[in-house]
Amino acid sequence: MADESDTLADHGPPTPNLTAQSAAPSSGGHEKISRWVEPYPKPAGATKGMGQTDFAKVLEQQRDSGQDPWAPFDSRDEWELAQWLLRNVGQNATDEFLKLPVIAKQTNPSFKNKRSLYEKIDGLPGGAEWICETLEIDGDRQDSQGEPERETLQLWRRDPVECIKELIGNPAFRDQMHFEPERAYEDKDGKSRVYDEMWTGDWWWETQDKLEAGATIVPIIIASDKTHLSTFSGDKKAWPVYMTIGNIDNATRRKPSTRATVLLGYIPVTKLECFTKSKRSAAGFQIFHDCMAMLLGPLKAAGREGVDMTCADGFIRRVFAILAAYVADHPEQCLVACTGERRCPRCLAGFKELGEPVRSVWRDPESTLEAMADMEEGVSSDTFNAQGLRPTKPFWADLPHCDIFSCITPDLLHQLHKGVFKDHIVAWATQCVSGGQAEIDRRFRTMPRGANLRHFKKGISLVSQWTGTEYKNMEKVFLGVLSGQAEPGLIRVVRATLDFIYYAHFQSHTTQSLRNLDAAWVSFHQNKHYFIEKGIRTQFSIPKIHSMQHYIASIISRGSADGFNSEHPERLHIDFAKSAYRASNKREYLKQMTMWLRRQDACYRLSSYLNWTARDVTNIADDDAEEPDDDNNDNNDNDNDNDNSTTYGDQDSAPRYTIAQTAPYTLPISTLIDEFGAVDFVDHLSDFLRSSPSACTRPPHSTDHHQVARLQTIHHTYPTYSSTRKGTTAASPSRFDIILIQERGHDAEKEHVLEGLAVAQIRVIFRLPEDFGMFTEPLAYVEWFTPLSSLVPDIGMYKISPSTRRNQRRASIIPLSQVERTVHLIPKFGRAVDSSWTSDNVLEKCKSFYVNPYFRHIDFVLFRYLAT
C-alpha cells in the first residue's frame, strides 16, 4: 500500500519525441501550440479492420429495401410531428390532438391515435433492452406462521456491454472519442504536465501496461444517486444508476442532450420492513451490493477477455471495459467502499486524523477483502474494525483491474460547495463577525450587481431552497463580504477555502495549478486554528474536509475533477427519473418508466440517425434544460435579439463583442451628459477625433445626435489551462458595467500578465454620425479607475479607486474593441456598511474597491493564478 506523499513528484523526463497539438491560428497568423503530447510507447487502441456501425447497417438495409431514412413514418415532417408529441404531450392529450379536424383531415398523419403512434415508435431500434430481475428477500422477522417475512423486489437493468457498444459506436461522438492513453505537457521539454481528459491521467497509462498489446481500454464511469420522484407529496423514490465511458471527452459527457451518459438501471428502493431495526441497515447495504453485482456482472468477462466492438470511426477494436470511476456523494461513496460514514472511503485515516493534514495510506482492495473474509469466518476482527469496514460482500470483488477505492472521485458539489463551504465555512465565519447574520445579510444586500451574479436582495439568511447555483454565487462574493469586518486569520482561512474550490474546478490542470491547489489546502490547515481560538470548533474531524487532500491524486490519476461532478447525474434525474415518473399513472411506475424511456431513446436514436445521414452529426441541437454555466458568461439580458446583431473582433484570438445592428436610441450629446453621466463627452470626443486618422476633423457639438447602442455579448477566448469554456450571454441594460480594457500600445510581449490592462466603467456605447468620416466601429465613453498595482495581503485582491483629475472623474472615449471583459468590483466596506449604500448606488458612493477574482473562473485564472 502506498501513501500520497509523492503525488506531485516528477514522473521523470518524457520520451524524446513529443508531438505538438495545434490550436487555431493566432491573430498574427502564427500557429498556436496548445500542448505537447507523449504517445503511449506500445500498441494501444489497435484496429482489427473495418466494421459497420449500427447507423451504417440501418442505412444499408434501407437502401436495399428502398425505404426512406425516416421510415416507418411517411415523411420527415410526419416524423417530426411524432417526435414532438412523444416528447411534449401526454397519452390522453395525444389522442385528443390527433382527433382535431385540422390534424385528422388536413395533416392526415399515418398514425390516427396514440396506439398506432406507439406501435410505430416501438418498432424503432431502441438500444439495450430492459430486463426485470426479481429478488426474494427473507428478513429476520417472523410472520404469524413462524416463517421469515419475505419481501419481493424488482431490479430493472440493462446490459452494460450493450450500452458500451452503443456509446463507443455512436458516429456522433467520432470527433470526441479517444482510444489510447497519452501524457500531455505545457512545454516542449516535458517539464509541466497537463491533466484534463481521462486519457491524460496516469490510471489509463498504468492500466494499459497490464493488458495485451493493442488492447483498447474503455474506462467505465458509474454514478448513482437516490432521488425523490414527487416534488410536493408522497415518498416515492428511485435509485438510478448511470454509466458513461472515459473515451468521450468531458465537455460532451457533461451535456445531457448528447446522451453520452446512459441509464443502466434502477436499484430497488425499499423500507425492508421484513427486518428488525437493528438488522435493517446491514441488509440494505448488502442488497445494494447484490444489485450492483447483477448490474455490472457482464463487465467481468468484458474486462478480462475483451469484446470486439465497432467504434465511432468505423474500425473494430478489442475493447476491455474496466470500472475506472464511481461518482457519488459521501454516504454513497462509503456504501460503495463498504466503510462507515465517519471514515474516508479512499484511505485509512482514522476519525481523529480526518481534520489534520496527514498524508494517509491508501485503502487496498486485496487487504480489505482479506479483512472482510476473516471477519466473516470469525478469525480476527482487529483489522476489520481498525479500517472502519462494514460486513458486506462487495460487488467489486471480482471486477478485473478494479481498485474501487481509487475509483472514488472528488465530488465538487456535495464535498466542496455544499459541505466545506456552505455547511461549515459560511456558518463558522458568520459566528466570528460582529453583528453576525444581520451584518452578513446587510453586506450581501449592498453588493453591486453583476452579469450572471445572483443578487441576494434579502441577504442569505432567508434563502429557502439551496442549490449549487446559490452556493456558487455566495462563493463569488463571500470573501469580499467579510472584508473590513473579519480579522486577518479569518480572511486567510476563507481565502484558502475559496482558492481550493476554484482551483479544483479547473477543467485543465498543469503541474503549477496542482501545486497551487496543494498550497491552498496547506494554507487552510495552517489557518483553521482561528476557529478553535474563537471557540467555534474544537476539532475538524469532518470527512468532507478530509476529502480535500485526495483531489490532487485523483486529478493526476483520472483527469480533471469536473469530469466527475455529481451535478451531472443530479441533472439527469430530470430526464431519467422525474419526467419518466410523471409520464406514468403512478402504479407499478418503474415498469412504465422503462417503457417511456425506451420510446424516448428510440426517438433520440432516429433523430441522431437522420442527422448522421445528412452528414450533420456534430450539429445535434443542445436543448439542455440545465442551469446556465454562469462561470463563462459575461452578460445577461434575455430581452436582446441576438439575431439582429453584429459581432466585431478576431474570432480566433481576441475577445469579441456583439451589439444590436439597429441602435435603440438616437440621442443628442446633451442627453448623454445629463442622463448617462458622460459629463466631458464633447472634450473627450474631440480628443479621440484628433487622434483618429479615419475620422474627420469637424469638432463635435452638443446638438449632435449619436446612435446609442447596448452591449449584448462578449465572447471570450480562454487559455488552454483555464477551467473555462467559450461562452456568451447578453448584458443587462440597467447597469453601467465595469470593464477590463486592453490599453493601446501593450500588444507586444508583456513582463506581467496585467501590464496594459486597466479597469473602467462604461457610461455609454455609441456610433459616430455619418458626417464624422469612415470610423464605423462602436465607441465607448469610459471613466477610469486607478491602476492594477496595489495587491492587498491576506485577501489577495487588487485595490482600486475612481481615478480623478482636478476633482473630476478621469474619462476617455475608446474603441469598443479594446474591451477585454466585464469585471466585478467589491466595495471596501470597512467595519460597518454605510447606511446610504445600496446595490444600485454603491459604485458611485464608495471610494475604494477590490477587483473580484472569484466573479468567474476566467477572472480567477487572471487575477489569482497568473497575476499573483
Image (spheres, helix red, strand yellow):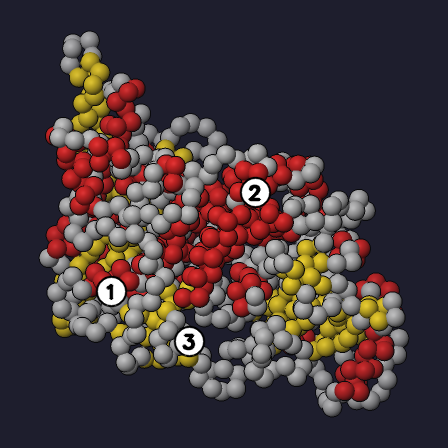
Work out how far the residue at label 1 is from the one at label 3, CA to CA, in angstroms: 21 Å
Task: State the count of labels.
Answer: 3
**To which residue does mark 1 refer?**
205
Q: Quadrant of residue 791?
A: bottom right
Q: Residues within 10 Å of mark 3 (few under 14, many from 20)?
A: some
| Closer mark to the observer between disc 2 and disc 3 | 2
- List x then y, in percent, for residue 793: 63, 58
Task: Tell me: 762 left or right of 640.
Answer: right
Task: Identify the residue shown where x is 80% and y is 87%.
Answer: 690
First-in-chain label (2 vs 3): 3
Q: Circle 2 — which element?
A: helix
Give the class, few, some or many, for how many residues have Cα within 10 Å of label 1's Cα (few <14, many ≥20). many
Instruction: Point out the frontmost of discs 1 and 3.
Output: 1
The quadrant the C terminus occupies is bottom right
Q: Which residue is mark 3?
A: 34
Instruction: Give the residue type that dot 3 points to.
Output: Ser
Label 2 crowding class (10 Å Cα cut-off): few <14, some 14-19, many 20+?
some
Q: Nearer the viewer, residue 570 or 805?
A: 805
Is residue 527 something one can see in this rendering? yes
CA gap between label 2 and label 3 equals 42 Å
Q: Nearer the viewer, residue 136 or 428?
A: 428
Query: What residue type is disc 2 on?
Result: Tyr
Residue name at image x 48 percent, y 66 percent: 722
- Residue 530's mark? 2
For mark 3, give the secondary structure.
strand
Query: What x and y, as percent, mark residue 171?
Result: 28, 66
Q: Amino acid at mark 1?
A: Trp
Foreground pick, 482 / 86 = 482
Up/down of 858 relative to 484, above or below: below
How far across and down, in percent of the image, does residue 163 sit? 23, 53
